[in-house]
Each structure stands twice: as structure tokens, then as C-alpha cells.
Image (tube, rainbow, N blue to C red):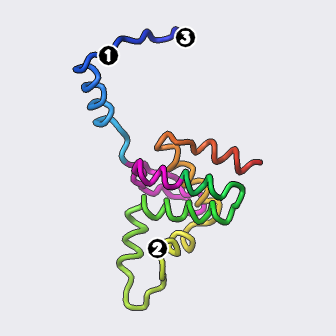
Amino acid sequence: MAKKELVKATLESFMAKAIERKQTEVKFKDIEVPSLEMLVTFNKPSEELSLEVINELSQHDGDFEALAGVFADLIYKCCPMLKDIYTKQGSDKKYSTPTEVVVDLLTLSDRLAVGNELLEMTGLGGKDVKKKLKK
């Protein structure tokens, strides 16, 4: 495969490419939740949230309990349906924290798979997390 020749950017071409990238960017994705045998819609994590997750993961290198907690938080923040479940609870309040919804409804395996998919959406390295898990 031939390498694409790069063109020197002008202010106009630079701005046009940036605008085009923003307009074509994936903003949500249907991700399979294996244990439920369903596709669930997730919003793409913001840059800020993605960096927060990467920082958390780097601080807890090899701590799988922490990894599962970080992913549960990421999943909750990116899934409108899970937010609805938490916010529309009746007075009986089954869940005291948002991440309890995620832990209750998704298996550990689901949380790791979906968390990786969400990180891959950002381009910040879901595959790298999988490599760490295999070590």
C-alpha cells in the first residue's frame, strides 16, 4: 500500500479539516453486553472523562478491583439508560450510588469489555488496557 503524500496545511485547509473531523466524529455507539445478549447505546466519553479514566488506571496498575470500579464509573457516565435507571428510582432507592446500577446489571466480564470499547472509541488505548489485563 502506497503511503499517502502529505500536503502542507494552510490556515483554511487546517480549519476545514478540523471542522470536517468534528462533524464526522462518532458521538455514540451501540456496544454488545454479552451476558444480556443485547446492544446498548453509549455516548462517546468526553476528552476530559477519558483522561480522567486513563489517569485512574495508571494509578492502580494491576489492581483489578480498582480497574472494575473505574470502568463501572465510566460506563455509568456514558450510558443514558443506566442514568435513567438511577435517577428514576422510586422512594425505595434500590441503588445508593450510580455505579451500583452498573455493578448490579452488568457482570464483571461485561464491565471490562464495555469499558475497553469505550476507551477504544476515544482512541486512547482500550487495547493497552487489555494487554495489562493479560499480564
Instruction: From the viewer's side, name the closer residue of 31 and 117.
Output: 117
Q: Are marks 3 and 2 in contact (CB under 8 Å)?
A: no
Instruction: From the viewer's side, name the closer residue of 85 and 122.
Output: 122
Q: Secondary structure at mark 1?
A: loop
Position of residue 129 measured from the top left corner of the image (x, y, whole percent): 63, 47
Would you name the residue on which mark 3 appears?
1
Q: Residue furthest right?
A: 135
Instruction: Name the quadrant containing residue 21.
Output: top left
Q: Which residues are magenta?
A: 28-53
Residues under labels 2 and 1: Cα distance? 45 Å
Residue type of the residue flagged with mark 2:
Pro
- Within 10 Å of disc 3 (Cα), the crowding (few <14, some 14-19, many 20+) is few
Residue type of the residue flagged with mark 3:
Met
Residues under labels 3 and 1: Cα distance? 24 Å
Position of residue 46 measured from the top left corner of the image (x, y, whole percent): 39, 50
- Within 10 Å of disc 1 (Cα), the crowding (few <14, some 14-19, many 20+) is few
Q: Earlier in the sequence, mark 3 or mark 2?
A: 3
Q: Quadrant of the N terminus?
A: top right
**Which disc is residue 9 wearing?**
1
Q: Nearer the viewer, mark 2 or mark 1?
A: 1
Q: Report if residue 30 lies within the magenta region.
A: yes
**Which disc is residue 98 wearing?**
2
